[in-house]
Image: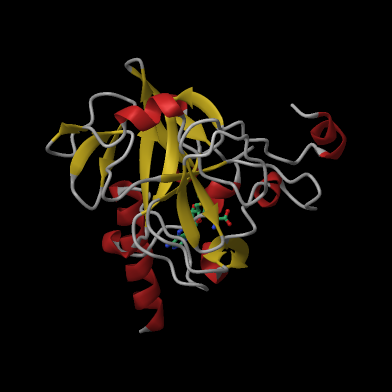
Amino acid sequence: MPAFAKKTIKKTDVVLKIRAPHYIISGDKIQLKESKKIVRSDEDLGAVPAAVYKEMGKMKARNLKIDRDSDIGCPQCNKIFYTSCLEHPLFWVPNKVDRRVKGPYTHKTLPTNFFRVSDEGHKGQGVRAIRDIPTGLVFGPYEGIKTKAEDCKNPDYSWDVEVNGLKLAVDAKEKGNWLSLVNSPDYKRGGNIAPFQHKGEMYYLVKKPVKKGEELLVWYGDAFGRRLARWRKKAEKEQQ
Ligand SMILES: C[S@@+](CC[C@H](N)C(=O)[O-])C[C@H]1O[C@@H](n2cnc3c(N)ncnc32)[C@H](O)[C@@H]1O
């Protein structure tokens, strides 16, 4: 690391040591860089290391049945790829903590160049885009305390993951990052985020473009969907 960097690095900075071809997300532009230099700037968010880049886009299966934890499904092609579909590549936005932000950990971890925390009335807090967000951006991992899936006490704040055959839950209720603020759409088709497991962790993929001002929405699953339907019925009855 060059000496000058030592002086200027703050705890909150992400230092990316990328010597391989990688993607740079800068403003609205996404560029593939071949540079061998170390890239370090707040705007340099996405990265694909060399070994992964070589294998990128290799199709592993023709349907969305994932059997290797590192494989990734493309929701647009409905196929499984090693790391990413080349037509619809993924751009990973790594987690980051800004300790200067006052408030809970969920707020300190919010990527403020993309989103703001919003008040969504009866749903509680939510997350809205402050700029147009393209498909293919991946946020995460979803942070939380890992428990056995059957011991999970907060299913609304948890994702189930399978690691080496063990069924676990990542419970964000006590200590979750900003991803735990993302609400569910009222109907299954209404979401713009696809959750997926990769190497034992959960990530959120932007599967539909999100316009500035729109809320991020991820379908929690059919069990929560049934509860939403019951709440809707109850609200309708109360209105009559
Ligand atoms: C993972 S949290 C999402 C963040 C939450 N709004 C908050 O302020 O902590 C899940 C909880 O959000 C609320 N929620 C999410 N989507 C909802 C929806 N479509 N309708 C009503 N409540 C919703 C429910 O209370 C649910 O238990």
Q: Is the residue 177 above or below the residue 7 in the image?
A: below
Q: 109 or 74: which is nearer to us?
A: 74
Q: 145 or 60: which is nearer to us?
A: 60
Q: Position of residue 182 (x, y in %)?
A: 50, 55
Q: Is the residue 121 above or below the residue 230 in the image?
A: below
Q: Is the residue 33 above or below the residue 134 in the image?
A: above
Seen from this angle, which residue lies furthest top? 164
Q: How is the image coloured?
A: secondary structure
In the image, is 240 to the left or to the right of 29? left
Q: Identify the residue at horizontal 21%, vertical 36% (top origin).
A: 80
Which quadrant would residue 95 be assigned to in this image? top right
Residue 199 visible in the snapshot: no
In the image, is 134 to the left or to the right of 171? left
Q: Is the residue 173 above or below the residue 2 in the image?
A: below
Seen from this angle, which residue lies furthest bottom? 240
Q: Position of residue 70 (x, y in %)?
A: 34, 27
- Quadrant showing the N terminus: top right
Q: Identify the residue at horizontal 67%, vertical 41% (top origin).
A: 40
Q: 26 or 163: which is nearer to us?
A: 26
Q: Position of residue 185 (x, y in %)?
A: 38, 62
Question: How many marks do you count on the picture?
Answer: 0
Q: Identify the residue at horizontal 32%, vertical 25% (top origin).
A: 69
Q: Position of residue 129 (x, y in %)?
A: 53, 66
Q: 40 or 2: which is nearer to us?
A: 2
- Quadrant showing the C terminus: bottom left
Residue 63 visible in the snapshot: yes
